[in-house]
Image (spheres, rainbow, N blue to C red):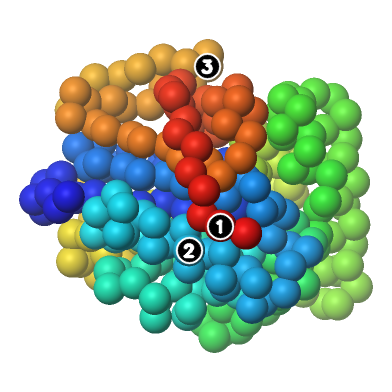
Amino acid sequence: MTHSHDTPTIGVFDSGFGGLTVLRALVDRLPRAHYAFIGDTARLPYGSKSRRTIARYAVESAQFLVREQGAEFLVIACNTASALALDAIQDAVPVPVLGVIEPGATAARAASTSNDVLVIATDATIHSHAYATACQKLGMRALEKACPLLVPLVEEGWTTHSVTDQVIRIYLDELNAEATAQGLHPDTLVLGCTHYPLLRPLIERAVPAGMKVIDSAESAADAAVHLIGGTEPGCPIQSESATAETDWVGDHQSPVLPSTQIRCFATDSVEKFERLGSRFLGRPVGQVELVDLGG
């Protein structure tokens, strides 16, 4: 089902439900659009799979969003799939496809004056060196660090817990010490995992004074707005948030219009998706539909 330019159908894909932070950022900017989100929860984590398998899984989800849900644009809200399968997805579907890594690197380039940046992400994303490669193409040096404890802490709901604060400070102290040892002068930190926006307040308190924090979910949503609107990155973004009604969930506020339509799908663990998804989306995810994409 295809909609007008004012109400595009946007498909969002993740291996789990962390990518709901990207969907949330998209709704903030384009509340009139129609959204279909799929989390391939039956086959996560992608990080332990081969590139070929990741590509096959990601393509199946992308084709579901385009063929079954009528997506006119795709946002790959999964760092692992963006790093290892973006080309395969672009080849498999006839619609524009956007990942999260290049927008994050581009935002870091705009924010940094030293051209030295830090990246924190999951093991799989760090081992792919996708952010370092994207930053190098833009003339920056990137020092990457895997932070494997942060995703389970977020999913446990410990987003303001003192334990999480301590873990973040340990990771960042180690990363900054390594940067100093390598003669780098980083002034920007990229959050290279879609779970990490929920930790942004703790992270911003833990970074050195003056260091900018780049949320790759927000950066991807900004890039998607430009892609859908046919404008170049750097042009002013005309957000519709100011005209939207608001829906309050806990301490979070997300713009909602009567025309905002969100359908969420999962390949497994629907109950967990429904229980935890609202933390990432900033509003109830509603009834999550179970789909079978094969083995």
For label 3, the residue is 251
Which element carries disc 2, helix, strand or loop? helix
| Crowd class of label 3 (few under 14; some 14 to 19; many from 20; radius 10 Å) | few
Q: Looking at this view, is 243 or 209 the one in front?
A: 243
- Vertically, is 53 above or below 76? below
202 with respect to 138 (left or right): right
Q: Nearer the viewer, residue 164 or 38?
A: 38
Whether residues under marks 1 and 2 lie with C-beta atoms below 8 angstroms apart, the answer is yes
Q: Amino acid at mark 2?
A: Glu
The residue pinned by badge 2 equals: 60
Looking at the picture, does residue 150 appear above or below residue 201?
Answer: below
Q: With 276 as the anchor, is 26 left or right in this view?
A: left
Dot 1 or dot 2, earlier in sequence: 2
Residue 93, percent across and down?
34, 72
Q: Residue at x 67, y 76 (%)?
A: 51
User: Looking at the picture, how far across and down is residue 2, in whole percent?
Assistant: 14, 53
Residue highlighted by disc 1: 294
Query: Looking at the image, which residue sits at the far left?
Result: 4
| Residue type at numbered disc 3 | Asp
Q: Where in the figure is residue 227, as x and y percent of width and height?
A: 27, 64
* Residue ID at (51%, 55%): 293
Name the image quarter holding the C terminus: bottom right
Task: Give the residue at x 25% y 41%.
Answer: 34
